[in-house]
Image (spheres, rainbow, N blue to C red):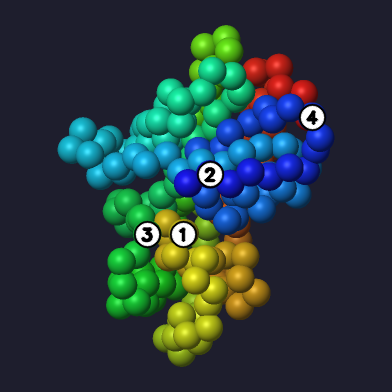
Amino acid sequence: MEIQHNNLSEKKDLILATTSPYRLEIFNKLGLHFTSKWSDVDEYTADRPSEPEALTKHLAKLKAESVAQNHKTWIVIGFDSVGLFNGEILEKPKSREEWFARLKAMSGNTFAFYSGVHMIDITTGKTLSWCVKTDNTMRKYSDSEIDKYLDNCDEKYKTHAHGFDPSNYYSMTFIDTINGNPMNVMMGIPLSTIMEMLKELWFTL
């Protein structure tokens, strides 16, 4: 699957190893000329790390490498995100019941959100890898509020590892405080970190 975004007239410079609507939206708003491709990576391999930072960096690397092997130029960026709550890694919920139970447990508590980013400059062979952690404290909300969100949420929220869409006008009220990069938890993309990584690869905005 390939999606081309032609905001600028010059040669394509970036390939995003993701089709996440949130990540694509951010890069579109930056006015960057990029192509996005699905990486077709099995995220549940037997040798996957158990710690969230290592896991997100590992999967972001696999996704970037999967896409990069079919190209000779450009910079490829791979992403992966997970949550961590009560020592358990949170990935995409598989059912409404799991979504509800997770949001109920998180009410009034704090969870961490990790995003790994891996960049490959195919021309030079240089690679960069980073992980950003953001801590989020949830306010105490009711069961009926959870149901209201689940009844009316956009289908895109299924892409979120923590099980809700923090950019949704209603569910954004679930978060009381954010400690760290807000774009990380809102869109799954630590934008300031990515800009610094691109600068290190001599990418011109």
Name the residue rendered at 66%, 18% in the picture.
200
Q: Which residue is mark 3?
A: 92
Q: Which residue is mark 1?
A: 159
Q: Real-space Cα distance between discs 4 and 3?
A: 37 Å
Q: Nearer the viewer, residue 196 or 134?
A: 196
Q: Are marks 1 and 3 in contact (CB under 8 Å)?
A: yes
The mark that comes first in sequence, 4 or 1, is 4
Q: Real-space Cα distance between discs 4 and 1?
A: 31 Å
Q: Real-space Cα distance between discs 4 and 2?
A: 19 Å
Measured as percent of width and height from the top left, residue 42 is found at 29, 42
The mark that comes first in sequence, 2 or 1, is 2
Q: Real-space Cα distance between discs 2 and 3?
A: 23 Å
Q: Comparing marks 2 and 1, which lies closer to the viewer?
A: 2
Q: Comparing marks 4 and 1, which lies closer to the viewer?
A: 4
Q: Is residue 22 above or below residue 77?
A: below
Are there few (<14), some (14-19), or many (20+) residues within 10 Å of tag 3? some
Q: Which residue is mark 2?
A: 2
Amino acid type assigned to the residue bearing label 4 in the image? Glu
Q: Which residue is mark 4?
A: 10
Name the residue rendered at 56%, 38% in the picture.
16
Measured as percent of width and height from the top left, residue 170 is found at 61, 78
Where disc 4 sits, the SS reads loop
Amino acid type assigned to the residue bearing label 2 in the image? Glu
Name the residue rendered at 18%, 38% in the picture.
46
Measured as percent of width and height from the top left, residue 5 is found at 68, 45
